Image (tube, rainbow, N blue to C red):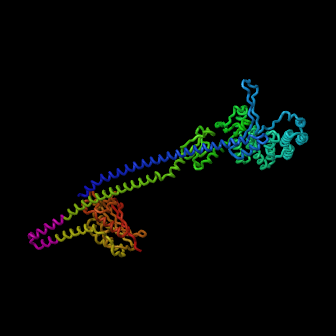
Amino acid sequence: MNPLRSAAWQRPFLWMGAIALVVLAAISITRVLGLRNELTSQVTAQITVTVADAVDTWETALLERLDQALEELAVEPTEASRAAAQIRRRGAWLDSLYLWVPAPSLPVGTAMAPKVVRGTLVHPNYPATEDTRRIHLHPCLGAAKAVSIVEGYDAVTLAELYVDGCAGQPMTVRLVAATEAATVLHRAGRDDLALLALDSARLPPDLPVGEAIAKGLAPFRVVGHRTQRAQILLSMGRMDEGLDLLYATGREVADLDATHANGLLPYLRWPIMAELEEHGREQQAVDLADRLERAERRARAWREVEERLLPRSASDLSEPGRFVQDQYGDPPFVLYYRLVRGGEYAAAAVLDQSALIADFAASLPALGPDLVVTDADGSVVYGATAGGPIAVAVPFTRTLTQLRVGVREQAISTRVRSYGNQWLTPLLVTVVFVLVGIAGISAQMRATNRQNELLVRQREFTTRVTHELKTPLAGIKVMAENLQMGAFRDPTHREDMARRIVDEADRLTARVDEILSVGRERTVPNPRKFDPEEPLLEAIDDWGPRLEDAGVKLIADLNPTDSVLGDAAALRDAVACLLDNGLKYHDERKAEPTVWLTLGQDGKHIVVDVADNGIGVPTAMRKAIFERFVRVEGPNRGAAGGHGLGLAQVAEIARMHKGTVECTPGVDGGARFTLRLPAHQ
């Protein structure tokens, strides 16, 4: 069967095989991706159930802890503060606790009382109040103020009137007198005496604000006394003492119950935080700003208790417990309240929402950074903003009902990747087999195309060889027949004819030898060291006259080099072939056709360079011409003869010497052939 026809029949089947593999790959990939999507859905459902269960478990536990805490708070008024302190130490999310006796219920049909009836607050207690006007009308203070009206009064004398005159009076009066005396002395530049004046109130500067309030002092008096001392210390240059006192005072004020902190929070902004920021205590100022936010949240929650819960009777309050969320307040608060001790008391707990969310997040450590909590508007109140969109959203159903627990897509992807063998392995196996199949088909198609190309070249070669062999054979036959018939009687003519027959036979033998050399594998059975200049000189001796007869100039530049290990005759044949090309393809239109032969050394390589200014080799053919049966067709090329074997032999000779040969642009449009052979040192 014709090989070309066989290859033509194979090509459609190869294409059909390739298409079948592609279709199989598409089906497999679609199925595998479907498995991945199914796995993603399963993981999403699992995480949703996990989060929902965690929310339910956490809410149940939180309600139990809250109910237990509020029941523990319902003790005698004298013990309520101690119980509250113990309860708050157990839970960081408990911000404040309130206990009160509910307001009495009015009988049905009773007209509304002129004044609203309120419950009785048990814990925390209301701070002591003072009659500021009555205090300032105290005789000892009045006497000192009368002197201050007189022009030219002495500051020290006036301060002594305040301090000495009120020395035996109650603490509140002494505090006012000490503050006034210190103010007078500070204005007069006597800060040392101003500190002594403050000490005259006999209020220890390190006495905690909460304890001072418990002793019956008005909160603003205590805080005012401490901040005045701190500012005088700053004025005296005792910076660390003054700033430390301000920071300690700010922390104590921010940690007070809302009933005691009412009216004191402005002190935090000025002078406390303002002085800290001005004197380089930025970190402490930031800490107080955070504490102030929590204190303001407690203040808002206290207003909720005071205005809405204290006026309610036991019948209006909830036994199971209820939440009040002020999510949109600034700052927001969460309040939980219920009746305790069988309705004898009512209790409420102000909760720190951030601490509650952190407590919940700790119950889901596996989700870690992918867990996020959002409010009703979708704004993130906890968790990172990165990690992709929220894939799972579960609401709090009984506690923080305004919030939702979300899990970002990244957590889904991470878990799907951990189960990757369920879908990734089949996908990889399918892709590998498809790629191998396509690669095999592609290789087969390339081999088929290569075979077709070689068959075409071989057919063209056979046609050319047949034509070239028939021509001399026909000539030999004709001349032999003439001799046989005695057409040439003259001995001279017979000898000439015999010589011509011998010449034609020699040429025919040379053609046959050239063809046979194609089938021989060139080897160097006995490689020998030789000087590459010698075979090049032999080639010059042989081809120099031929080039000269054709009008082609040969310029040789042979430089001393290292030796080459191989076959000198093979190198001579390779150079001869390149010189033959320079002769065959010279450009007759040029005034001086030239071939340049150069020998040199480049590092560890011997370089033989044959260049010409002939018709050249097209760029696309500069690699293919070193293959068998490849010829460059075109004008002025077919007349040169040849079978496309010479340069293939040159490439084979280069390879058997472990060298290379390449074709590059020559001179003025010509070609350049460069042989690079390893030097033998």
Count numbered badges in the picture: 0
Q: Residue 89, relative to residue 525: is it above or below?
A: above
**Quarter of the rendering containing residue 230:** top right
Task: Say which quadrant the N terminus sits in.
Answer: bottom left
Q: Is residue 48 left or right of residue 307?
A: left
- Residue 193, x across and y down, in percent: 86, 45
Q: Is residue 121 magenta?
A: no
| Left or right for 227, reference 364 | right
Magenta span: chief secondary structure: helix
State the residue in front, 109 or 520: 109
Q: Nearer the viewer, residue 309 or 126?
A: 309
156 or 349: nearer the viewer: 349
Q: The magenta stretch spans which residues? A: 470-499
Q: How far across and down, in percent of the image, does residue 73 sit?
A: 73, 41
Q: Is residue 624 above or below residue 376?
A: below
Query: Residue 480: x, y in percent?
Result: 13, 69
* Residue 341 found in image quarter: top right
In this image, 302 relative to 226: left or right? Answer: left
Regarding residue 158, the answer to whether it shows in the image is no
Q: Quadrant of the C terminus?
A: bottom left
Q: x and y percent of residue 291 in the render?
A: 71, 43
Is residue 350 at least partly visible in the picture?
A: yes
Residue 490 falls inside the magenta stretch: yes
Of 9 and 557, nearer the camera is: 9
